[in-house]
Amino acid sequence: MTYNHSVKKILLILFISYAFISSANANSIKGAFGYELGDVYKKSDRAYTYKFTPKNTFPGLDDYSVTTGTDNRILNITSKTLKYSYTLYNCRQGNYSPFKRLLNLLQTKYGQFEKVLDERREYSGRLIDEVEYKYENEDRYIYLSCNTYSENGTTDYRLWLEYQDNTLFKKSIEDLSFKLQDVDSILMLDLWKNDSYWYSS
């Protein structure tokens, strides 16, 4: 094997490796709205959820927050909107609705999302419509959902986008088992996603 042939072979291997690494990094979940999962947000002696206003907001999302663990590192980034007696948007409109635009934007950046729920049903006299997507990479995920419920000619609407680091989340749950006074700030994450919170409004 000649010297030139060996160099070309090494360069080819490096090129393939670089392409693979670049491709993997392109789909990795780091964060959103100017914050990264795992970064220290604010020094505190407890887990907490902080609201913030990003420099660049997304149409259809009007509430933004980060949740930190007991080590002050960001474990969750959430943006959402809750609108009551609303008729402008629903979860089944075309590609120009905030939900579809956001889904298309996310899939362009990260790749295909898995549809984890697509359901219409009645609940206590209300017509419920739910569509949810999820993207997972390593121990992090992005969750996007659109929910509406209609009753007596009016529609309540929720659009929800969430980034989470499960490793940090589980660690905080373990830490908080020894700090009962801090549990509420973490359990709010599950409460917000629970049907009873949404439907009791």
Image (tube, rainbow, N blue to C red):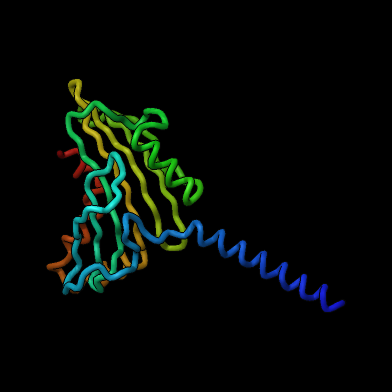
Residue 196 point in image, percent of width and height: 20, 43
Side (left or right) of 71 relative to 182? right
Q: Where 25 falls versus 82 (above or below)? A: below
Q: Is residue 52 above or below residue 112?
A: below
Residue 124 sits in which quadrant?
A: top left
Locate residue 147, reporting x and y percent. 29, 37
Image position, residue 191 (x, y; %): 21, 51
85 displayed left or right of 12: left
Q: Which of 178 and 155 is in front in this view?
A: 155
Q: The N terminus appears in which quarter of the rendering?
A: bottom right
Residue farthest to the left?
181
Answer left or right for 187 relative to 144.
left
Residue at image location 30% in from the left, 59% down from the top? 76
Residue depicted at x 43% and y 44%? 105
Based on the displayed image, in which of its 4 quarters is residue 24 positioned?
bottom right
Camera-nearest residue between 195 and 154: 154
Image quadrant where one finds the C terminus:
top left
Q: Is residue 142 left or right of residue 78?
A: right
Q: In this view, does 70 lie above or below 120?
A: below
Residue 114 position within the rendered picture, expressed as x and y whole percent measured from the top left: 46, 45
- Residue at the image position 39 percent from the left and 38 percent from the top: 101
